Each structure stands twice: as structure tokens, then as C-alpha cells.
Amino acid sequence: MHFAWNTPDIGNFIATLICIVLVFAALFFVLVKVAKRKASFFFLGSCAFLFLLAYLFDLPVVCILVAAVTSAGLAACFFANLGDLRKFIANPFSRQTAKAVNFGIERIYDTQQLYKNIESAVISLSNARIGAIMTFEKNTSLKDIMKNGVPVNAPVTPEILMTIFYPGTRLHDGAVVIHGNEIIAASVFFTPTTKPFAGKYGSRHRAAIGISEVSDAVTVVVSEETGRISFAVNGDLEAVTQQNFLRVFENYMADHSTSEE
């Protein structure tokens, strides 16, 4: 039997091995580290092992078959993990750990009181039919996106939020970005989603969905026309009642380990 390492050009053999390792290492990073799919890891590892064996034993037909299966599998993996990959492409150097991004001195605050303040502001805005969009930063840093807004660095209170979104004020248009118990910026404009929807959605709702497609942030939208309250999370929009707002908000803000198989 002829083996690949018996080739006269040993330099070409080593270079080919290095290329194979680099290609599979890059695919491993994208599918496993970014998309965090264990199934992708087993699939990719099996393909790499079979391809390497076929190459070492100089079985070109097997190499072609494994390459074809790998290509089809990779295409399926990319489509299945498109949402996670889009987040990575939009902000490849964002921090994805459970530790929140530190904008300054971390303060100890009453989370329940903070959520009550947000609930009070949202319900007041809804009753008054004042359009609003609030984005709550979690693990993905929105620092670069906030550059088009106006720095605020104010505490989260119903009065400040109502003042910001009151029609006619300079900061009324755009979103506020909240980190912890602090309003970091206002009048921030997000890239709207291009996803088609059956219903009619305004610019606020499309902007909210757009930021949720590229980050793990939780965005609350209040409709100016109807006063309806909605959440934009992971590229989806969910309408809630005033009575259910606090429960749903607390659930979305909780840190959940999403170890998807």
C-alpha cells in the first residue's frame, strides 16, 4: 500500500498537513466557540479524523467523499447557527462572558427596586401612548453602537425616562441604553432589521429587533400609536400586557446558561 508520507516531496506533504489542520481549526472556532454547538464539534472532529486517515493512507476517493459530506454538513451547520454567527460577525471582539461590561465603578443596587422603576416608567409611557425604546445591555458590549448617541450617565428613574421620551425633547428619538442601574446613553440609533414580517412594524420595532439580532441585549418597545409593550430578544418580538411586564422582564434579564446541543 502506498502512503502519503512516502512521497518524494516531503515538504509538500508537511505543507498539506498544516493546511488541513489550519482549515479545520478555523471551522472549529466558528462552529464550536462561536455557535457553541457540541453536535458541530463531534461532526467536525469525525470529518477531520476520517479525512486525515484517508489522506495519510493515500485514498483519494475516500478523501473526496469525506470532503463532500463535510461541505454539506458545514452548510447545514452555518444555516442552523446563522443567528449566533451574525452576532459574531457584527462584533467579533465583544465580551461574551457572564461578567457584565464595566463602564466605571460598579455600584451595589437593589435589583427589585430597579425593575419596579422600569415597570413604572414603561406602564406610564404605555398609558400616555408615548413611543419609547429601552435597551438593557447584558453580556455583549454595545459600546461601539452607542457612539452615535448622547452620553447621559444618569440613574434609572421613571421621571428621567419619562423626560427623555417626552415628545418634543431633543432625546425623544432613538433608544436609551441601560447598563445595570445607569442610563448610559440616549438617542441611540440601531440598524433596523431586514427580516420580513407579516404585520406592520414601525421604525422603533424594527430597530429593536435589529439590535437583538446582533447582541444578547433585552429591548423594550412602547408603541406610540397603540401603547402596546413588546420585548425584542434574539431576533424575535413578543408583545406583553402591563400586568405581565415585570414577570417577563425579570425572566429575560436573568442570566441563563444556554448550552445548546
Image: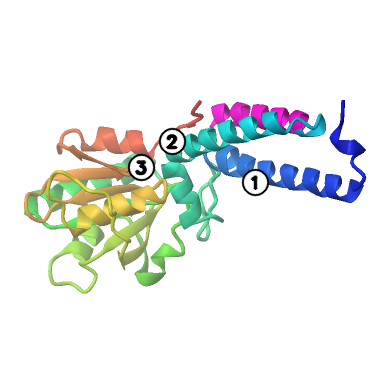
Q: Secondary structure at mark 3?
A: loop
Is-magenta flag for residue 51? Answer: yes
- CA separation in Å, label 2 and label 3: 14 Å
Give the residue displayed 53% in from the left and 58% down from the top.
Answer: 105
Q: Percent position (x, y) of residue 97?
A: 55, 44
Q: Hey, which quadrant is residue 42 in on the image? A: top right
Counting residues from the start of the chain, the first of labels 2 and 3 encountered is: 2
Q: Secondary structure at mark 1?
A: helix
Q: Which mark is residue 26?
A: 1
Q: Percent position (x, y) of residue 167?
A: 12, 67
Closer mark to the observer between disc 1 and disc 3: 1
* 54 relative to 110, above or below: above
Q: Secondary structure at mark 2?
A: helix
Write down the residue under mark 3.
234
In the rendered structure, the answer to whether residue 2 lies left or right of residue 235 reads right
- Residue 68 seen in this snapshot: yes
- Residue 157 seen in this snapshot: no
Disc 3: CA contacts within 10 A as few (<14), some (14-19) or many (>=20): many
- CA separation in Å, label 1 and label 3: 25 Å
Is-magenta flag for residue 193? Answer: no
Counting residues from the start of the chain, the first of labels 1 and 3 encountered is: 1
Please identify the dominant SS of the magenta region: helix
In the rendered structure, the answer to whether residue 255 lies left or right of residue 200 reads right
Find the magenta span and give its range: 37-54
Q: Percent position (x, y) of residue 155?
A: 35, 58
Q: Which mark is residue 80?
A: 2
Q: Amino acid at mark 3?
A: Asn
- CA separation in Å, label 1 and label 2: 18 Å
In the rendered structure, the answer to whether residue 119 lies left or right of residue 191 reads left
